[in-house]
Image: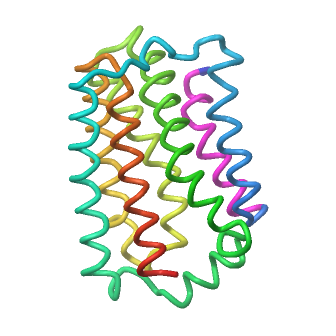
């Protein structure tokens, strides 16, 4: 039961922030607060998984660049079908993303979000599930619940009927990063890859949506 609460908690924070408060600042506060505080309160912050070596650097940069090309290249090619740009601009303005704090949000998304998400999912939660379960179970569960709150987000951002198209890459990369965590025993590579992937998403925002 405790693990289920830990798994579903981030999605509840995103849901409350976007659906109830409809504000990006509140959403970031709830979401980042959960990701940061739960491992600390549980005295299970996975600091031993934060080791950097040449292999982690290469794997992180390599996986991140592949995802960058997929996200930015795909969006550049297919955004006329996937995104209603005008509607999206209004939505982001209503949520408070586009505005005076826009650049701060972009920096948070590129540099803080990957660290907190990877520490939580591939560090803290993976450790919890792997302790009493198989690698396949830990990889599948962390990827599934990591994907869940992205469904809530992309439901608002993409054209009707394209939610699955937008979410499927998130599930794939969630599985990949959990696999990397299993094989390397480190989350440094996944943090690096995740940062590059989030940079790709912000490039889509800056050069296509904005």
Q: Is residue 153 above or below residue 52?
A: below
Q: Residue furthest front?
A: 54
Q: Is residue 141 left or right of residue 106?
A: left
143 in magenta: no
Q: Quadrant of the N terminus?
A: top right
x 72%, y 56%: residue: 17
Q: Is residue 12 above or below residue 51?
A: below
Q: Say which of 33 and 126 sits in front.
A: 33
Q: Say which of 201 and 7 sits in front.
A: 201
Instruction: Characterize the magenta stretch by its predominant secondary structure.
Output: helix
Q: Is residue 155 above or below residue 41?
A: below
| Residue 103 place in picture, x, y as percent | 62, 65
Can you tell which quarter of the image residue 182 is in?
top left
Q: Is residue 207 left or right of residue 210?
A: left
| Residue 196 place in picture, x, y as percent | 36, 50
Looking at the image, what colour scheme do you see? rainbow
| Residue 83 place in picture, x, y as percent | 42, 82
Q: Is residue 2 left or right of residue 22?
A: left
x 29%, y 58%: residue: 68
x 43%, y 48%: residue: 147
Q: Is residue 120 above or below residue 160?
A: above
**How many marks can you see?**
0
Q: Say which of 41 and 56 sits in front.
A: 56
Can you tell which quarter of the image residue 31 is in?
top right
| Residue 75 place in picture, x, y as percent | 31, 74
Which residues make up the magenta segment? Answer: 3-20
x 38%, y 15%: residue: 130
16 in magenta: yes
């Amino acid at each position: 039961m405790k693990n289920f609460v830990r798994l579903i908690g981030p999605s509840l924070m995103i849901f409350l922030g976007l659906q109830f408060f409809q504000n990006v600042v509140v959403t970031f506060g709830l979401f980042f607060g959960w990701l940061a505080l739960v491992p600390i309160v549980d005295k299970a912050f996975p600091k031993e998984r934060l080791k950097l070596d040449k292999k982690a650097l290469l794997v992180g940069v390599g996986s991140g660049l592949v995802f960058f090309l997929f996200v930015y290249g795909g969006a550049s090619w297919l955004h006329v079908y996937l995104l209603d740009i005008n509607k999206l601009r209004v939505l982001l303005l209503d949520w408070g993303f586009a505005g005076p704090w826009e650049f701060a949000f972009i920096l948070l998304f590129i540099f803080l979000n990957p660290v907190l998400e990877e520490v939580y999912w591939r560090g803290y939660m993976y450790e919890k599930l792997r302790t009493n379960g198989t690698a396949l179970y830990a990889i599948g569960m962390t990827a599934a619940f990591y994907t869940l709150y992205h469904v809530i987000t992309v439901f608002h951002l993409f054209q009707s009927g394209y939610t699955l198209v937008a979410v499927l890459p998130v599930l794939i990369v969630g599985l990949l990063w959990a696999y990397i965590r299993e094989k390397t025993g480190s989350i440094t590579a996944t943090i690096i890859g995740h940062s590059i992937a989030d940079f790709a998403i912000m490039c889509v925002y800056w050069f296509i949506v904005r």
